[in-house]
Every structure is written in structure tokens, then in C-alpha cells.
Amino acid sequence: WHDVWHDSVHYISHTDKGIFFVLKTLLLQPGLLIREYLQGHRKKYMSPVTLLLICAGIAYISINIFSLDNRNKTPDSKAETGLTSSENTKQVVTNPVVERGKKFNKFIQKNSKLITVAAMPVFAFGFWLLLRKTGFNYTEHLAANFFITAITILVYGLILIPAVYFSGKNTVFLAGTFLFLIAEIAYRSWAYIGWLQYRTPGKRLLIIACTILVTLIWSTITVGLGSIYISGVLHDIFS
């Protein structure tokens, strides 16, 4: 952790080769950055692990500051419902599926980008498996996804989360998350196309198809696990 902190201070204080330079390049030329880094020109860029940790930390702070729970906490919430806390508890308990659904949605909202970080090995494996003919190994795909995920987490934390907070509506979160997912697919595809220097429409469509497929696989895993939890299957098994 000391090394990570030292690197973080160093990279932030050196704007020509630090985090601002890397973020600018990732926004404008992600494929170029990934390609040069993997070709060994690493003095010009910061470590993808360090970058991810910094961006995840910023996003985490933003998520906790701009939480809808903080906005919705009011002293008059009890008076507005007209129910006592015990009555509210009874109503929630009588519908355990709804309660588990709320808990799962809250978990997704609060930890969505941590889930994205957990997805990186799956994404890297998927791209490596589908693009084996490119000659890049799994570790190189993992490094590429570290860079891509870092910038998407930062944008998510600094733009989407505050927008949801100031709107005060969960529907904005759902709509924003869907639009962000589309944008993330487009960005990841663009980064891979630039990295691999694909020029023909066929190869570019291949990258887009691979990105969509890997995203769908991860989404299916996430939704499947969430459905199992909400349905109470695991609770029934272990109770």
C-alpha cells in the first residue's frame, strides 16, 4: 500500500506523464495508450493497477456522498407514512421476496463499480478466448481492461451518480445505468479497435460483436445470481 500511495502522489504531481495525461489519452485515444503500454513504452504512462485504484477510490467517495439514502433520510418520514416503525417492519417482513429484491437493488446501486472490477477477469478471458488469433495473451487483455475499466468507473462516479442524486429518482438510475452500459460497450469496442488497429468494417464488427457477447455473458451471470437470491432458493436450501 505504501508503494501504491507513493506512485499515486508521483503520478498526480507529474501532469505531463501523470494521471491527467493518462485520463486525457484514455478519453481521446484509448487504443493508442493500450498499444504503446503493451509494447513497452511504460515510462510514459502510469500503471493500470494504480490508475484503477485511484479511479475506484474517487468513484467510491462519490457514491457515498451522492447516495439516494442520504437524500431520502428525513425526520418526518415516519409521519409521512402514518405508520409506526413496528408496523412498517411487519409489512416488509410479510413479503420476503420484495424485501430481498430491494436489498439486491440497493447492493447493485452501491457496489455497481466494484462489480465491474470483479468482472474484469471475465472480460479479459472472454476477449482472449474470442481473439486468440491476434496473438495477445490473457495478461495483456487483462491490462487493457484495467485501463478501460478505470476510465469508465471514473465517469460513472463523477457524472451518473451525482445526476441520479440531484434528480432524486431511482428511475433515473435505471435509465442512466442502461445508457451507461450502451456507452461502455461502445467505448470498449472503440478501445479494442484502436489497440488492434482494425481498419476493415468486418473486423470492427467482430470487435463490437465480441464486446456485446462478453457483456451479455457477464450480465447473465449477474442477473442469474440476483434471481437466485431474490427467489429465496438458497435460503430454503440452508434453512
Image (cartoon, rainbow, N blue to C red):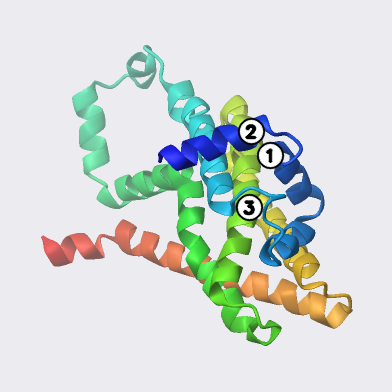
Residue sitting at 51 percent across and 55 percent down?
A: 116
Task: Say whether disc 3 or disc 2 marks the residue closer to the N-terminus.
Answer: 2
Q: Decide if residue 144 is on the left or right side of residue 106.
A: right
**Which label sits in the foreground, 3 or 2?**
2
**Three-letter code, disc 2:** Ile
> Which residue lies under the disc numbered 1?
18
Q: Name the one closer to the observer, 51 or 111.
A: 51
Q: Quadrant of residue 118?
A: bottom left
Q: SS of the residue at dot 2? A: helix
Q: What label does residue 12 carry, if any?
A: 2
Q: Earlier in the sequence, mark 1 or mark 2?
A: 2
Q: Is residue 50 above or below residue 117?
A: above
Q: Is residue 208 left or right of residue 28?
A: left
The answer to whether marks 1 and 2 mark residues whose Cβ atoms lie closer than 8 Å is: yes
Looking at the image, which residue sits at the far bottom? 133
Tell me whether circle 3 and circle 2 mark residues in contact (CB < 8 Å).
no
Image location of residue 198, percent across then percent down: 83, 75
In the displayed structure, would residue 8 be above or below residue 115?
above
Q: Residues within 10 Å of mark 3 (few under 14, many from 20)?
A: few
User: Residue 151, relative to residue 223: is it above or below?
Assistant: above
Amino acid at the residue labelled 1: Gly
The mark found on residue 178 in the picture is 3
Q: Is residue 161 visible?
A: no
Outermost residue toward the left in this view: 239
Where's residue 210, x and y in %?
A: 66, 76
Q: Tell me the kind of residue under disc 3.
A: Phe
Above or below residue 201? Residue 149 is: above
Real-space Cα distance between discs 3 and 2?
32 Å
**Mark in front: 3 vs 1:** 1
